[in-house]
Amino acid sequence: MSDELGKTLEASLLWSDGKRRTLHKGASPLVNSDRCVNCGTCLRSCPTGAIREAQRQICRLCPDCAEGGIMFPRDMEALTARSCSLACPLGHFPEGYLNLISRGDWKGAWSLVSAVNPLPGVLGRICARPCEEECKRGILIDRPMPIRAAKRALADWAWENGLAEKRVYHRNLDIRVAVAGSGPAGVTAAMDLASLGYRVTVFERAPRPGGMLRLAVPSFRLPDEIWEREFALALGDGIEMVYGATVGIEPSLDELERDGFRAVILATGAPLGVKLPIPGNDYQGVHDAVSFMAAVKQGRPVELGEQVVVIGGGSVATDVARTALRKGAREVQLVCIEQECDMPALSWEVEEAKREGVKFLAGFAPTRVTSSWMRAEAVELARVSAIRCDDCGRLTPELKAGNGMTVKADTVIFAVGQAVESRHLERMGLELDDAGRPRVLDAMGTTSRRGVFVAGDVIGGKGSAVEAMASGRRAAQAVDAYLQGKTAQSEERSVTGAPLDEKIFPVRLEKLEPMMLPHLGREQALASFAEVELPPDASALETDARRCMRCGYVEVDHELCIGCGVCRQACPAGDVITMGAPVSGGDGS
């Protein structure tokens, strides 16, 4: 430690109550950027927000160094403002646990993941992977880092080694909060509030938790034993579960208030399947995706023909199409109004469906289902010239005259979205939007009824599990602020550019071939509902994790820093942050 630690420095800080106070700072944290793995632990623990993420610029000027196309300085600067951590809705810093895996520190990596994520094994299988879309390794060099696969491997490793333990919540606050719904959004909200000490009760209409994960996500993507064990661990000890209860009816919101519940989070999802309002949508052999997938998941008989047409272009549509193949369909065609490059389904979901034999008809809209004796026999399609979107996100295609086609189909399944139970919500006294969903007053899920907040698919959104969980987290933050008399604000984090002497030169990176994730072959996959994506080999994952370019590290804003040393104590590495002579805000970082 420096001899100058005995000195003090006055720091004038603006506090959350709007008052400015002067503190005497006896030391300042110094970050060793070479050793920092950018795990985000110190950033989350800093009481004043003085820790921030810095992103290194990646040089792409010289053709000899750049394996891909070169970039001008302004483009490199724009890329520096992006990071995998900013892309994660839930708050992960993937670089941190990837770098620990590369060192063989699986226990440390698991600590980072489990501190943020209540369902790591679930998201390790079905996350939409927004972080990988922002991975600069994939953008500039070869393939994105296998962030989702790493999360899955960590969750499975922790379970096998007894580190995935049931969470224990201590009810330190005598304040009751109700959560309606035990899907990803509800469980995340309940966990976050229980971790803060609130007395949380989750009301679930079904006899088991899970929401749409239990009802509709096929087991070849998410085996039942995975979500069952993870929900059990997340709900843990200290969260009360009430099954067979429909909040808004029994119990009503008024009854919950009389029973002492000070706030309610509605995370009831969008459980109703939707069919397009076209002639023939009520013929025999025509289904909505929710009913079809629920029947398959519950083992109920499903009448399925040989020629199946799935209407829709999202993730649910590809799940339905792949499920139909496993249920014995000879031919499955997926019809969507978007062109293939614009489909809502993610690129790898489309590729997986194609690999299994699903055929795509992009840029077409169904206009009519024809029948023979009231049973579906074909679908008439029209070409789409344009797509309009209203304020509620509903799509309306504009059709071209002529150039249509008819495809044979003895089974038609609509996967065109899901609806909420609007009448039920309206009876609760909530103001609804034009789509029949609760009208929210801010990004935190605040509704028109005092003390009632919403999260997850009940308010729309992208429909992915990770987005639903992030929505539940925001709702929990809003409830905490409401109950503590504070103002809830959505966190919009950004990164800063690192000094140019931190610049990354790709030519100096270790040359490693990207790992190929293992999958079942087509015939083996279609023979059952076994999980298609297989776990990566641990040693191969450790090697592949070395491809991470370590784009980011943390730095200190000394104008906000009070020198408390919490960051040094929180750092899992122990030698990244040291305390040195006090530094003023004007002296840089």
Image (tube, helix red, strand yellow):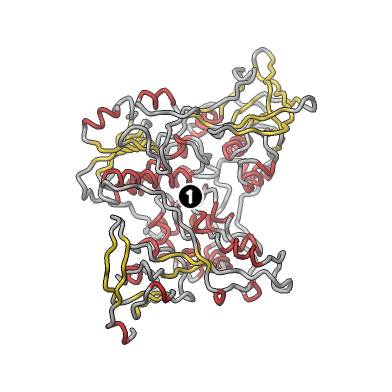
Q: Nearer the viewer, residue 168 or 141?
A: 141
Please state if 247 lies on the left or on the right of 538 as rendered: left
The residue drawn where x is 62% and y is 17% is 283
Where does the C terminus fall, quadrant-wise?
bottom left
Where does the N terminus fall, quadrant-wise?
bottom left
Q: Quadrant of residue 81?
A: bottom right
The residue drawn where x is 64% and y is 47% is 347
Residue 156, visible in the rendered structure? no
Please state if 185 lies on the left or on the right of 381 as rendered: left
> Where is residue 146 shown, x and y percent of the image?
56, 59
Measured along the vertical axis of the image, is residue 5 above or below residue 511? below
> Where is residue 90 shown, x and y percent of the image?
45, 51
Please state if 141 lies on the left or on the right of 183 as rendered: right
Label tally: 1
Q: Which residue is mark 1?
A: 123
Residue 171, visible in the rendered structure? yes
Extreme residue in the left direction: 174
> Where is residue 73 shown, x and y percent of the image?
65, 67
Secondary structure of residue under mark 1? helix
The residue drawn where x is 38% and y is 56% is 164
**Residue type highlighted by circle 1:** Leu
Q: Quadrant of residue 469?
A: top left
Measured along the vertical axis of the image, is residue 275 above or below residue 78? above
Give neighbour class at mark 1: few <14, some 14-19, many 20+ (Cα, 10 Å): many
> Where is residue 418 shown, x and y percent of the image?
52, 31
Measured along the vertical axis of the image, is residue 277 above or below residue 558? above
Extreme residue in the right direction: 403
Extreme residue in the top direction: 373
The residue drawn where x is 24% and y is 40% is 176
